[in-house]
Amino acid sequence: MTDPTVPPSLPREFGVYFALLEVSALVQHGVEGQLRRDGGLSFVQFQILAILGEDPSSPRSMTDLADRLVHSRSGLTYQVDRLERAGLVVRAPSEADERGVNVTLSPKGAAVLERVLPGHAEEVRDVLVDALDTGDREELTRLLRRVLRHMRSRPPRSARRSPADGVEA
C-alpha cells in the first residue's frame, strides 16, 4: 500500500487528512458487510443502536443522536423510522422539550445489538486493531481523542443558530 497522495496544491502535512479519510472508508467498508449479514443493519443504524446501547435505560434525544453521529436531522429521522418499523427502537415525545423526541433501544434492538457485536468486534479487529501493537493503539487513541476534543469544543450543529437569529446557543 502506498502513502496517501496529497495534491500538489496542498501542504505535505495534509497527508494525515487523506490517510484518515482512506482508513475511515476502509474500516466502514469492512464492517458494513458484517452488519448487513448478521443484523440487517446499515452502518448508521448500527451506530444509532450502539449509542442507545451505551445506557439502554436512558432515552436519547434526536438532537443528541444527530450531534453524536454528525448526521443530518432528516437523514437521522429516516434511519430511526426504519429502526422503529423493525421494532428495534421506540420513539416518544420528550418530557423536557415539547418539540423534542426521545429514542430508546427496544428489547428486540438490544438483542440485535448483542447478536452483531461479536462479529463486529472480530471485523474491527481484523481491519484495524490487529494492524497495530499495543503501544501504537494507545498512541493513536490518544491522538484521535485530542483531535476529537478540539473538534467537539465547538458547539454541536444543533446548538448553532443561523446568522439571521443573531444568537449563539
Image (tube, rainbow, N blue to C red):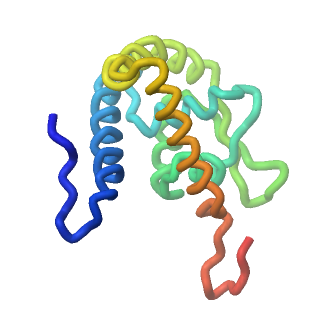
User: With respect to residue 28, does 162 lie above or below?
Assistant: below
Q: Nearer the viewer, residue 117 or 24?
A: 24
Q: Position of residue 155 (x, y in %)?
A: 66, 63
Q: Residue at x 65, y 49 (%)?
A: 64
Q: Quadrant of the N terminus?
A: top left
In the depicted view, which residue is nearer to us: 153 or 4? Answer: 4
**Residue 107: % across, % down:** 63, 19
Residue 91: give x, y in percent of width and height: 65, 41
Residue positioned 50% across, 35% down in the render: 47
Q: Nearer the viewer, residue 92 or 113?
A: 113
The residue depicted at 84 percent of the width and 52 percent of the height is: 96
Q: In front: 3, or 34?
A: 3
Give the quadrant of residue 31. top left
Left/right placement of residue 147 relative to residue 13 reads right
Q: Say left or right for 136 vs 89.
A: left
Q: Quadrant of residue 11?
A: bottom left
State which quarter of the image contains the C terminus: bottom right
Visible residue check, residue 37? no
Res. 54 in view: yes
Q: In this view, which residue lies farthest toward the right?
A: 96
Q: Judge whether 162 appears above or below 104 on screen.
A: below
At 66% from the left edge and 40% from the top edge, which residue is drawn? Answer: 103
Disc count in the image?
0
